[in-house]
Amino acid sequence: MGFSIVSSIKRTIIAILLSTISFVIGFFIGSIEFVNSGVPPSSSLGFLGELARFFKPYTIMTVIFIYLKNALAVFTIWLLGAIFMIPSLWGLGFNGYIIGYTTTFVAVKYSLTFALASTLPHGILEIPAIILAGAAGAELGLSIIQKILSLFRQSSHSIKAGLKSSFRFVQVSLILLIPAAIIETYITPLIMSYFL
């Protein structure tokens, strides 16, 4: 029993580290990509423009839209972890890439202060929520890998503990996304207006 708890804690720590590293690498690649290309996000990440048309500050529909968009990302990143965690970490890195690319664009076009004002208020909650989703996916993937390895070693390993633990991460992510969506809709635009 004690070994199972230690194994679970190690798996959780590894999952959180892998997801954080994946996000940070994606962020820096996105930043470097913008610096090298100089292409505005609307041109290189065209789907962002499509999503942006749904964004109307100070409306409850925007809160719901942002929450559902981010919740979909959380579930996708988590469930992709079942495929040996690689797609989950890639999805998390891609989210980091988008944030790095757009934040660098805003910093270059306006100012670093404006970029931080447009990202940090809601990002303080949203980014950890996305990283936790990646950790959930990595945890799920690691648990499945452990199960497969246990078959070769003729030992037993239950995926149930990894699934429960990873789902707790998803629950925390979904809870963090509620205030993040509210802040992104009502507070971030207000703070940004002070720096324009």
Image (tube, rainbow, N blue to C red):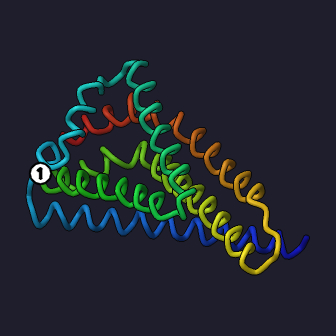
Residue at point 39%, 66% (across, down): 24
Expressed as whole percent of the image width and height from the top left, the position of residue 127 reads 45, 52
Residue 165 visible: yes
Residue at point 17%, 53% (across, down): 105
Expressed as whole percent of the image width and height from the top left, the position of residue 151 reads 74, 73
Relative to 15, residue 195 above or below? above
Relative to 57, residue 21 above or below? below
Q: Count up the numbered dots.
A: 1
Left or right of residue 96: residue 83: right
* Disc 1, SS: helix
Residue nearer the viewer, 44 or 80: 80
Question: Which residue is outermost to the left?
Answer: 38
Left or right of residue 132: residue 121: left
Residue marked by disc 1: 109
Residue at point 50%, 37% (across, down): 71
Question: Which residue is outermost to the bottom?
Answer: 153
Check the picture and name the quadrant holding the N terminus.
bottom right
Kind of residue at badge 1:
Lys
Expressed as whole percent of the image width and height from the top left, the position of residue 168 reads 69, 49
- Image quadrant in which you'd find residue 153: bottom right
Relative to 82, residue 152 above or below? below
**Circle 1 crowding by C-alpha within 10 Å: few under 14, some 14–19, many from 20:** few
Residue at point 66%, 54% (across, down): 166
Residue nearer the viewer, 180 or 88: 88
Residue 186 visible: no
Check the picture and name the quadrant holding the C terminus.
top left
Left or right of residue 127: residue 49: left
